[in-house]
Image: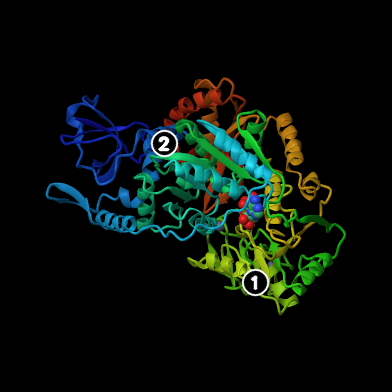
Amino acid sequence: MILKLALDTPLPDLIDYRWTGEARIGQRAIVPWGRQTVMGLVVECVEHSDIEPARLKDAIAVLDDVAPLDAEWFRLLRFAAGYYQRPLGEVALPAIPALLRRCGAYRRVEGRPLSRSMTALRNRLAKAAARPPSADSASSVPVMNAEQADACARIEAAEGFTAFLLHGITGSGKTEVYMHAIKALLSRGRQVLVLVPEINLTPQLEQLFRGRFPLARLASLHSGLADGERALQWLVAHEGQADIVLGTRMAVLAPMPRLGLIVVDEEHDPSYKQQEGLRYSARDLAVVRARQAGIGVILGSATPSLESWVQAQRGKYTKLALTQRASTDAQLPLIRVLNTERVQLDHGFTLAMREAIGVRLARQEQVLIFHNRRGYAPVLSCGACGWLSPCTRCSAHTVFHKNDGRLHCHHCGWEVRVPRACPDCGNVDLAPLGRGTQRVEEALASWYPAARVLRIDRDSTRRKGSAPAMLAAVHAGDVDILVGTQMVAKGHDFRNLTLVGVIDADSALFSADFRAAERLFANLMQVAGRAGRADKPGEVLIQTRFARHPVFAALTSHDYPRFAAGQISDRRAAGLPPFSHQVILRAEAKTIDLALAFLVSARELAASADATGVVLYDPVPMSMVRIANVERAQLLLESSSRPALQAFLPRWISSLRGLRSRVSWHVEVDPLEI
Ligand code: ADP
Ligand code: ZN
Ligand code: ZN
């Protein structure tokens, strides 16, 4: 028999191996590959191979210690490979946990290949299965309001594939709607996949689900798991023991034989986009997966992506709206814009902001200061000669971190001790320029010495387990002022938090990226949603020098539809997504000239690959040209026709493979940042 295997290599085709034993599609196989031994996946079992017999190699072993991956899983992975222009093996193998891809662990025992780590996993699984689920009394279920009930009824009434866009303002009780839909599917013996954008949101939801569904088995999948744990969680999803699989974007590729519903919470969140390797959108794949499986998918958000919003307007998705806060006494926070154009700032704060903080502290309510920039200051500067602390490897500045007295590059990780004097002119008076969260924290601590100030950002939560502990401290009321980045903006339900301050909304406003306003609106709406979630009214203060920018008018009136309408008409006029489809070819090389030269040839090759209906722009250096001594350029492709683009790409990419050059390149379909 001939096994056609997917291997994790850039080769576009399946690789043939001879095999005399038994084998089934979807099993893993250990095979020789050059001088190595690698794990492959059986995609087809056939009689004949077109490879001449002398060159055909024998497979070493076919493994039967994991249930074979089924046709539905292959269908999804095939779609992902085709859509994102990658060989199947490069997509399918990395989707399997590393532990199950390790060949070295296998020894032949009584003629069968066995791995000790696999045996250990099986033992743990058996133990977990023997343990009865903690069947405490289920937590109480709030009576749904009319909008929630209507949303649930429409979800329940749907048959086959339906994509719902659940647009609910922050605190409107979207989670309650998810849980209602989940409950219905669980009672029919189906599995449910729940995606969240951020790993720190999984414990909170896990607890909620355990309370609500005490009999259901839960698996969670995210990048924070050690290899053994990841394999275990994946196995219970794949072999069907898990009823609910909760995870970050990677979980969208988890095999689930009884899958009946997919929920994508905060569907607009950019973290659903994988930025390396297979550059996929877990949100988009969730919709594809639901369509393939003929099931429902719920995309929830207070600020849907314009892509999803337009799909709903076109009638492709079913829109469900929650327009009121669910908790009867919780009101929407009052959002106010503080114009800083002609105002004296103290450490970046207006007087109005500081007074508002003082009022909350006096009332023993919590304050969140949102600042999306970590470190102490974005750059260290010399007042005498204008030197700005550079990264030696990137076209970027290094960020001053005061707690370790070092300059860190946030792009490549390079770091260095703060110099005693300016390296250019010897001036010893180096000053931090601008502010990051550490500096904000310092100012707040000096103004409010009695207050407990906590900073949550990537630096303060580097140690494993520290983020959940810090968030728990906020929930427990052990923190008065929370200073945080994006990490705290998402999803958390802080009951005693009544003021959110944004001290600088401007850096995001005038970026070259056409999605900047959309992202800013979503970020600010989401962080604003942290205020006043229980009985006390919340207030949000946003400092900006551009108070008349339309994004703020929409924000203060909590009017996403109005904001979206403005954006959509701009995008339509400019022919930007979602009214066109984009692809980027990125080239990385030792020098920008090499990278650009490659892209110029790539552009020329497009003509021979028939680029009808596809616009190819001029190659340009990326806005940050150099990262870690690699220089980068990109070529943007655009088309109003998805089929035209998808037909062109494989032809073009295979001709690119023939280009000889010293650049590394990749194609990104539907890039989020261009
Ligand atoms: P969202 O995810 O839309 O921001 P949540 O689902 O977190 O909102 O709900 C906000 C709060 O309202 C939660 O504390 C939740 O328990 C509560 N809640 C949800 N639905 C109801 C309801 N029908 N009645 C009372 N409280 C509710
Ligand atoms: Zn100097
Ligand atoms: Zn760097």
- Residue 130 is situated, as x and y percent measured from the top left of the image, at 31, 57
* Quarter of the image with the C terminus in it: top right
Q: Quadrant of residue 423?
A: bottom right
Residue at coordinates 50% horizontally, 28% vertically from top-left?
649
Q: Is residue 580 left or right of residue 547?
A: left
- Amino acid at circle 1: Val
* Quarter of the image with the N terminus in it: top left
Crowding at label 1, few (<14), some or many (≥20) Cα neighbours within 10 Å?
A: many
Residue at coordinates 37% horizontally, 56% vertically from top-left?
227
Residue, disc 1? 479
Q: Is residue 148 left or right of residue 75?
A: right
Q: In the rendered image of this protein, does residue 663 appear above or below residue 504?
A: above
- Residue 345 is situated, as x and y percent measured from the top left of the image, at 81, 66
- Amino acid at circle 2: Leu
Residue, disc 2? 77
- Residue 213 is situated, as x and y percent measured from the top left of the image, at 48, 53
Closest to the observer: 509 or 21?
21
Residue at the outermost bottom position: 450
